[in-house]
Amino acid sequence: MRTLRLGLLSLLLALGLAVSACAPWRALIIFENRSNCGGPIAIRLTNERTGEVIRERVADGQVLEIEVRPDDYYSYIVDFTAAGRRADGYRCVALKEGRVRIPQGSVPLRVPLESQLQMPAPSPTAAP
């Protein structure tokens, strides 16, 4: 009787592991903010089939995961200027655009976000 219970328990455990291994992966786009812009940057992601728009912000050094519908195409715009001006006067000025599709069952797509800094404009000085 005890052997039957252990056998049944082992079978249930193996079945549970097999089912979890076959579970579908989540379709993810991962934005990694490596910009050093000083504030959060804006992301707009649009599902080209449905027109659904997702708006998010991701802070310096942070990672943002957005779950999307598998096999749909998405266009995205990343606005680095949304971070504003840093305390030292520098400002990120780039826009990044792209189009992605995450196939069903694939690994997440990582989108690194890096920007060039604009030099601060010299402030006018009064003449003596």
Image (cartoon, helix red, strand yellow):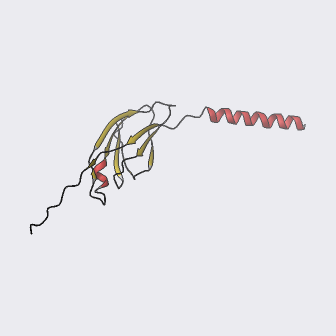
Q: Which of 76 and 95 is in front in this view?
A: 95
Percent position (x, y) of residue 117? 28, 48
Q: In this view, does 12 lie to the left or right of 71?
A: right
Quadrant assignment for the N terminus: top right
Q: Please tell me which residue is depicted at 36% across the width and 53% down the height of the picture.
A: 40
Percent position (x, y) of residue 51? 33, 39
Quadrant assignment for the C terminus: bottom left
Q: How many marks?
A: 0
Q: Please tell me which residue is depicted at 40% across the width and 39% down the height of the picture.
A: 111
Q: In which quarter of the image is residue 90?
A: bottom left
Q: Nearer the viewer, residue 99 or 18?
A: 99
Q: In this view, does 93 lie to the left or right of 33?
A: left
Q: Which residue lies furthest to the front in this view?
A: 128
Q: Please tell me which residue is depicted at 36% across the width and 47% down the height of the picture.
A: 35
Q: In this view, does 11 lie to the left or right of 26?
A: right
For residue 31, say whether it is visible. yes
Task: In the rendered view, tell whether residue 103 sits above or below residue 67.
Answer: above
Q: Which of 81 and 36 is in front in this view?
A: 36
For residue 48, say whether it is visible. no
